[in-house]
Amino acid sequence: MLVVRIDLTELLRKIGEEADIDEEERVSFPEDGLVLTKPVSVKLHLVNTGESVLLDGTLQAVAELECSRCLKKIEYPISIEVSEEYSKAPPPSEARRGKGIELKEEDFVYPIGADNTLDLGEIIRQNLLLALPLKPLCSKGCSGPE
């Protein structure tokens, strides 16, 4: 699991404070079918809004996939924009035992750790998985095994 921990102590001291993250880390998620052949490039901009920390930026990686027709191994470049929100306050919970609840936008905010840190590993994993094609092809004209 990718663990990019960011200490937000300085960022949280003042509303409007900003920070930039530019990191590379070699990881893979083979249990999820995501094998990365190059380090993940993480370029993020963080802003303290007072209520939360907004995170915007890009993730770049190269995944090793299998062509869905000929089964040849291929490299698939991934470049995606990410935008997330983190908060110290837990999301409001209206859950009652046995009752359904309606999720609201504020229910999709990630928590900031008690030690003022963000662990970006899960956000990165989820976004990379969502960027993968359902049926990767080595070429548009691939006709399958020869």
Image (cartoon, grey):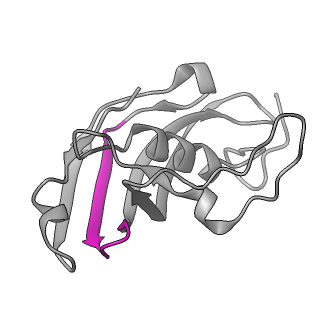
Magenta stretch: residue 41 in it? yes
Q: What x and y, as percent, mark residue 39? A: 31, 39
Q: What x and y, as percent, mark residue 113? A: 32, 41
> Residue 34 appears in which quarter of the rendering?
top right
Magenta stretch: residue 35 in it? no
Q: What x and y, as percent, mark residue 17? A: 16, 75
Question: Where are the magenta residues, as a range?
Answer: 38-53
Quadrant the N terminus occupies: top left
Residue at x 71%, y 44% (from the top left corner): 136
**Along the line of sight, the residue nearer the viewer: 20 or 97:** 97
| Secondary structure that dominates the magenta span | strand
Relative to 19, residue 112 above or below? above
Q: Is residue 127 left or right of residue 15?
A: right
Quadrant the C terminus occupies: top right
Q: How many marks?
A: 0
**Along the line of sight, the residue nearer the viewer: 81 or 47:** 47
Residue at x 36%, y 29% (from the top left corner): 27
Q: What x and y, as percent, mark residue 8? A: 19, 54
Residue at x 21%, y 80% (from the top left corner): 16
